[in-house]
């Protein structure tokens, strides 16, 4: 009955099933992110739709994605040794976005929270670029 009604409205079952599959995939990804132990901060900034910085063509999208998903910090890499989790810039604290943002003596301090810097609007892009430049200057650009 429902199928016939949708056919009359011009909706194909293939289309309907594709939409349903995408919704299920999205729900599964969200569930996976909520249980994730790799990058707990990502849960705070994830959006319902594609983030704005990924929706447009720009050089910003890669750097924002790397910092947002935690690829630019070492602390969340539970498979490396304790020493490898130290900040590549100052060598003092564990390398987290929070440390680089507020405690690292080699980084430009910002008066914003991690969530504010990593939000989809990309307000922290200049800070992220400065972190990358500092690492290159110190010879610590790659994760290793």
Image (cartoon, rainbow, N blue to C red):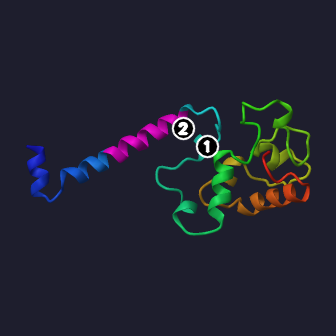
Above or below, 60 relative to 30? below
Please identify the quarter of the rendering in which residue 38 is found.
Answer: top right
84 left or right of 21 in image: right
Q: Residue at x 91, y 39 (%)?
A: 92
Residue drawn at point x = 8 percent, y = 49 percent:
4
The Cα atoms of the two marked residues, 1 and 2, are separated by 8 Å
- Please, what secondary structure does the residue beneath circle 2 have? helix
Query: Dot 1 lies on which element?
Result: helix
Sequence-wise, the earlier of marks 1 and 2 is 2
Label ID, residue 83: none
Instruction: State which quadrant residue 74 falls in.
Output: top right
Q: Quadrant of residue 94?
A: top right
Q: Relative to residue 140, is residue 93 depicted above or below?
A: above
Question: Where residue 122 sits: x, y (%)?
Answer: 64, 60
Residue in the picture at 42% in, 40% down: 27
- Give the tally of numbered discs: 2
Q: On the image, numbered disc 1 is attached to which residue?
A: 42
Q: Residue furthest front?
A: 144
Query: Does any portion of residue 30 appear in the rendered image?
Result: yes
Q: Looking at the image, can residue 108 be seen? A: no
Tell me which secondary structure the magenta stretch mostly adopts. Answer: helix
| CB under 8 Å between discs 1 and 2 | yes
Task: Please give the range of residues in magenta.
Answer: 21-34
Name the spot of residue 75 as percent of width and height, x first.
76, 37
Q: Which residue is mark 2?
A: 33
């Amino acid at each position: 009955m429902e199928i016939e009604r949708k056919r009359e409205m011009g909706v194909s079952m293939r289309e309907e099933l594709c939409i349903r599959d995408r919704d299920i995939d999205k729900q599964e990804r969200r569930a996976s992110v909520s249980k994730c132990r790799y990058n707990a901060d990502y849960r705070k900034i994830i959006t319902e739709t594609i983030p704005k910085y990924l929706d447009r063509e720009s050089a910003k999208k890669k750097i924002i994605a790397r910092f947002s998903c935690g690829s630019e910090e070492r602390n969340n890499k539970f498979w490396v040794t304790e020493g490898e989790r130290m900040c590549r810039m100052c060598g003092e604290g564990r390398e987290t976005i929070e440390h680089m943002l507020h405690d690292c003596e080699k980084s430009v301090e910002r008066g914003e929270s991690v969530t504010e810097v990593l939000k989809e609007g990309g307000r922290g892009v200049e800070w992220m670029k400065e972190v990358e430049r500092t690492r290159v200057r110190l010879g610590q650009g790659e994760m290793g």
